[in-house]
Amino acid sequence: MLADVVDAIVKDPMDIDEIKTLRNTISERLVSAKDSGDISNDEFLSAGKIEGGLGIIIAMLENEASSEEIHIHVDSIVERIRAISS
């Protein structure tokens, strides 16, 4: 799943619908994993930051922000994913 997020946000051009779908999937999986006790509160919050970052990228794409601004947020999300994955 996290590899899918990285793939979606580093490609050019980004597909906003793909990013929206991934954000929604992450949200659903996080709630399910939290409710079932499969992830800790800290893991839930860390992954939630990625979900929130995707929301920011979506808003930036919808508002036609510059690619430089968007890539600042992309780099931040990729960093968070690497931190979670290691």
Image: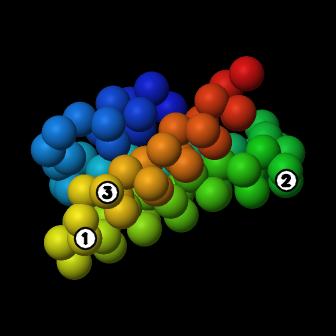
Q: Tag 2, which secondary structure?
A: helix
Query: Which disc number belongs to residue 41?
Result: 2
Give the foreground label among 2 and 1: 1
Q: Which residue is mark 3?
A: 68
* Few, some or many residues within 10 Å of mark 3 (<14, 14–19, 20+): few
Q: Position of residue 41 (x, y in %)?
A: 85, 53
The amino acid type of the residue labelled 2 equals Asn
Secondary structure of the residue carrying numbered label 3: helix
- Residue 17: quadrant of the picture: bottom left
Q: Position of residue 84 (x, y in %)?
A: 70, 33
**Residue 22 left/right relative to 83:** left
Distance from Cα at disc 1 to Cα at disc 3? 8 Å
Q: Residue at x 41, y 34 (%)?
A: 6
Q: How far from the left and from the top, in percent, is residue 80?
A: 63, 42
Query: Would you place residue 85 above or below residue 48 in this image?
Result: above
Which quadrant of the figure contains the C terminus? top right
The answer to whether 58 appears left or right of 62 in the picture is right
Circle 1: residue type: Ala
Determine which residue is flagged by label 1.
65
